[in-house]
Amino acid sequence: MPVRAGAAVVGFVTYVVTKQNMIAGVLVGEAILIAAYLAA
C-alpha cells in the first residue's frame, strides 16, 4: 500500500481546499491513512 504517495495526494488536496500549509496537510493525510490502514 503506497501510504506515502496516498498521504501526499491527500495532503495536496487538503492544501488546495483549505489553502493551509501543505506540509501540515501531508502529515494529517498520512496520519489518517496510517490509522485507516491499521484499523482495516
Image (cartoon, rainbow, N blue to C red):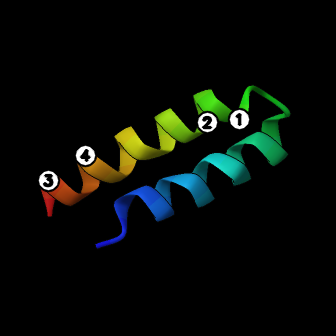
Q: Which residue is mark 2?
A: 25
Q: Are marks 3 and 4 in contact (CB under 8 Å)?
A: yes
Task: Tell me which corner region of the image, top left, top right, bottom left or bottom right, holds residue 19.
Answer: top right
Quadrant that contains the N terminus: bottom left
Q: Which residue is mark 1?
A: 22
- Left or right, 35 with respect to 10, comes to left
Give me the C-alpha separation between circle 1 and circle 3.
Answer: 24 Å
Name the residue rendered at 36%, 69% in the picture: 2
Q: Are marks 4 and 2 in contact (CB under 8 Å)?
A: no
Q: What percent of the width, then of the height, locates residue 21?
A: 73, 26
Q: Which residue is mark 4?
A: 35
SS state under label 3: helix
Q: Are marks 2 and 1 in contact (CB under 8 Å)?
A: yes
- Dot 4, how many residues are within 10 Å of its Cα: few (below 14), some (14-19), or many (20+)? few
Name the residue rendered at 41%, 45% in the picture: 30
Q: Which residue is mark 3?
A: 38
Task: Tell me which corner region of the image, top left, top right, bottom left or bottom right, holds residue 18.
Answer: top right
Q: What percent of the width, then of the height, locates residue 13?
A: 72, 53
